[in-house]
Amino acid sequence: MRSVVQRVKKASVTVDNEIVGQIQAGLLVFLGVGQDDTLEDLTWMVEKITGLRIFEDQEGKMNLSIGDTSGKILLVSQFTLYGDCRKGKRPSFSSAAPPEKAKLLFDLAVQQVKDRGIRVETGIFQAEMQVELINDGPVTLLLDSTKNF
């Protein structure tokens, strides 16, 4: 499982000219599900994302997690995180999970975030989405649940 985590001042997702998810200060997370991903990968990813200490404390050090700040997460499914660009000019997405599996794990990720007491907004799975954000810092992190990353 792969994710791009961005600390944001605000972010939103629009589908068909309608905002379907938006947050103020918090995390914008693009989440990609791979063919071999398991519930163990999912749980690791959600724990990592929700536990990342990337928000500033009173001394200005990155020492607080999303739960410590009462921020929200905007979680957006993005299979293109599994685009393999090593050969040719067009990415191969053969490592991405099929849509049925990806949606199941994405929905479980949303539920696991909620179960940790963190408010979460989402885009629409498999929709053509436009994402707007104001990156804070900028702070952007890449996470991968495999040992090969």
Image (spheres, rainbow, N blue to C red):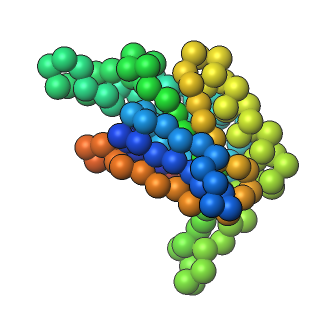
Q: Look at 39% across and 34% down and name the residue there.
A: 25
Q: Is 126 left, or right, of 64 in this rendering?
A: right
Can residue 144 be seen by looking at this rendering? no
Q: Position of residue 128 (x, y in %)?
A: 67, 63
Q: Is 104 left, or right, of 137 in this rendering?
A: right
Quadrant holding the N terminus = top right
Q: Look at 63% across and 41% down and name the residue there.
A: 122
Quadrant of residue 39 within the rendered picture: top right
Can residue 92 be seen by looking at this rendering? yes
* Residue in front for this viewpoint, 46 or 22: 22
Q: Position of residue 84 (x, y in %)?
A: 59, 68
Q: Look at 56% across and 60% down and name the residue there.
A: 130
Q: Look at 59% across and 30% down and name the residue there.
A: 120
Tell me if residue 57 comes above or below residue 128 in the rendering: above
Q: Position of residue 14 (x, y in %)?
A: 60, 55
Q: Residue furthest right?
A: 100
Q: Residue furthest bottom?
A: 88
Total numbered labels:
0
Quadrant of residue 75 within the rendered picture: top right
* Residue in front for this viewpoint, 27 or 105: 27
Q: Residue furthest left?
A: 59
Q: Position of residue 53 (x, y in %)?
A: 35, 25
